[in-house]
Amino acid sequence: MKTYISTLAAQVINNKNKPISPNEVGLQIPDEVIVAFNELIKRRWDGNESEFTQNDVIELILDISEETKGNLTRSSIFDRGYLNIESIYGKEGWDVTYEKPGIGDDFVAMFIFKKDGAINQIKS
């Protein structure tokens, strides 16, 4: 804790502070999460889409984290929003759908990745 406070104190002493911009606040997704999603996208790609469960990706994230001596847990993945990847993959050309069950629904949460614009092409 002292190191953290010392870092904040140094910012005050340097007197070069300005309000933070929205671009500086972005969620930092750990590499383990990106690697797990990338692997499942490739592994489950059928030529049109890649579909896998939330549990599939969490298990793979935790396996990778354990292998690399990371500190991710199931709770930290949810608490820190590490599964909120739709926008970052959207910027890379994916149309990402996250389907989660509602109250009384009997299915597991799923991620579906399609090439951006593929949904419109299929409907046409």
Image: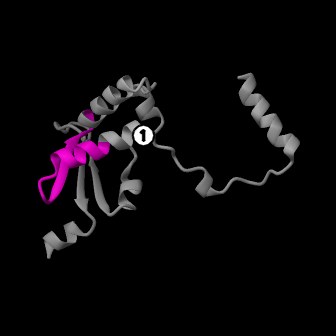
Give the residue at mark 1: 31
**Residue 15 vertical position relative to residue 58 in the rendered view, above or below:** below
Percent across and percent down for residue 105 are 19, 39
Residue in view at x 35 percent, y 24 percent: 67
The kind of secondary structure element at disc 1 is helix
40 within the magenta span: yes
**Residue 66 vertical position relative to residue 78 in the rendered view, above or below:** above
Count of labels in the image: 1
Q: In the displayed structure, does residue 20 sit left or right of residue 124?
A: right
Residue in view at x 76 percent, y 29 percent: 5
Return the residue nearer the eye: 78 or 8: 8
**Residue 3 vertical position relative to residue 56 in the rendered view, above or below:** above
Percent across and percent down for residue 123 are 14, 71
Instruction: Residue 122: name its quadrant.
Output: bottom left
**Residue 41 vertical position relative to residue 107 in the rendered view, above or below:** below
Percent across and percent down for residue 96 are 29, 55
119 within the magenta span: no
- Single out the residue that lies furthest toward the bottom: 124
The amino acid sitting under disc 1 is: Asp
Residue in view at x 45 percent, y 29 percent: 76
Q: In the displayed structure, does residue 25 sit left or right of residue 115?
A: right
What range is drawn magenta here?
A: 37-55
Percent across and percent down for residue 100 are 27, 43
The quarter of the picture where the N terminus appears is top right
Return the residue nearer the eye: 114 or 14: 14
The quarter of the picture where the C terminus appears is bottom left
Residue in view at x 41 percent, y 55 percent: 88
Model colouring:
one colour
Instruction: Residue 36: name its quadrant.
Output: top left
